[in-house]
Image (cartoon, helix red, strand yellow):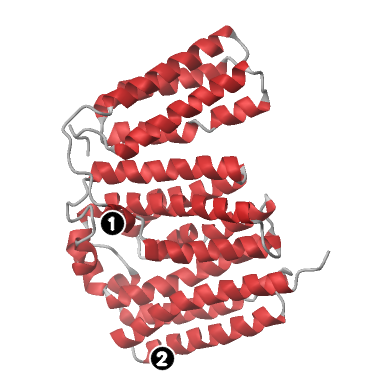
Amino acid sequence: MSTGLAPGPWLRLTALVAAVGTVVAVVSGAAHLGATHRVLAALVAPPLAALLMSAWLAHRRLAPAVLGAAALFAAAAAVPGTRLHDVFAALALAALLVVAVQSFRGEHVQWGSWRDYVTLTKPRIMSLLLITGFCGMVAGARGWPGTGTAIAAMAGLALACGGASALNHVIDRDIDPLMGARTKQRPVASGRVAPSRALEFGLALSALSFVLLATTVNVLTAVLALVGNLFYVLVYTRWLKRSTPQNIVIGGAAGAVPPLVGWAAATGRLTLPALALFLIVFVWTPPHFWALALLIKREYQAAGVPMLPVVRGDREATRQILRYSTVMVAVSLLPVAVGISGWGYVAAALLLGGQFLLLAHRLVHDPVPKRAGALFHYSLLYLALLFVAMAVDAALTAPIG
């Protein structure tokens, strides 16, 4: 993907954040702030890593300056409390300023409309992820987690989800044109946004997510959001999606991370109830995506993506959907077993799950697009309502005082 194009505003923003972070770290070191200085210095790592990836994949002429900045920053970290530490930090800042200046050089191209960048974040998918994350936060807090925490956690999670989705567009730009009208008009696949611009955008959002969550919520929340981001981009999109019909079974772990992010934002730790929320989304993912795969099997086949209906056929796919749906309904009762929900949630889970099983059973006996479409659309509503019911019940049944 390496090009002679000038970097776009997203890379410049990332370079600016890294430079400002370095200045803050230097100032905090001069003020002898100890642990605070080390934390502030560590927050420079994510934008610096994003710059390294952008330089290596799309803007090789920036690589020497970015590598120099990273090496100098690492050298400063290796000799804390010495004069060399200050010298290396100052040189790292100078190298980052060189990156910022060099980012204006090259052939300038239109960076696309704001609508295209919104599309890159896959807002419809993000909305469901934010619902599960927010409800996980309310369940963890057993009520309202605090306005500041809620806003910061959801903003950071949205940045992480949006960044991962943008990188997904970049990786899938070769197969999106093969999958029909649904994907061939995506911003990168259609050429409206250059791959390098989308790459910079995705990396910038991912880095900013970590910085925001680590500074305003807690480090565990930031790490979890980053892990979910990397798993979706590198493990699912880059590897599993094109290599195995079990892609969505394993890859579903990425979509199950937002409830963990919400729980960690509210509590600062991960406990057994958080794992229960993770498992619900994890088991829900295969029947949800296989129902979609039944609808667009020809598109997946044309793109060479080994989704289960393509490899094993419709009949086997519908049987697997029913099996996973049955397990999902059982797993949906775990919040009661671990003590975060009561009988109100049980009633909602059984009612919603019963309808899911009914639709899955009908699909097994009549595997036509109409049945698959009904299950796919209901699955979206199911997960949202299930998590809302869980959050409401957890808040209402929380002990007073």
Q: Looking at the image, can residue 354 be seen? A: yes
Number of marks in picture: 2
First reached walking from the N terminus: tag 1 or tag 2: 1
Q: Kindly identify the residue that appears in the image at 55 percent across and 61 percent down.
A: 133
Where does residue 397 sit, x and y in percent of width and height? 75, 73
Q: Residue at x 50, y 29 (%)?
A: 21
Rendered image quadrant of residue 289 = bottom left
Query: Which quarter of the rendered picture does the C terminus lie within?
Result: bottom right
For label 1, the SS is: helix
Residue at the far right in the pictured view: 401
Question: Tag 2: residue type?
Answer: Arg
Q: Which residue carries the number 1 mark?
A: 115
Q: Is residue 283 above or below residue 52?
A: below
336 lies left or right of 15: right
Residue that lies at the very extreme toward the top in this rendered image: 83
Q: Position of residue 209 (x, y in %)?
A: 48, 45
| Residue 280 or residue 63, whichever sits in front | 63
**Occupied quadrant, residue 33:** top right
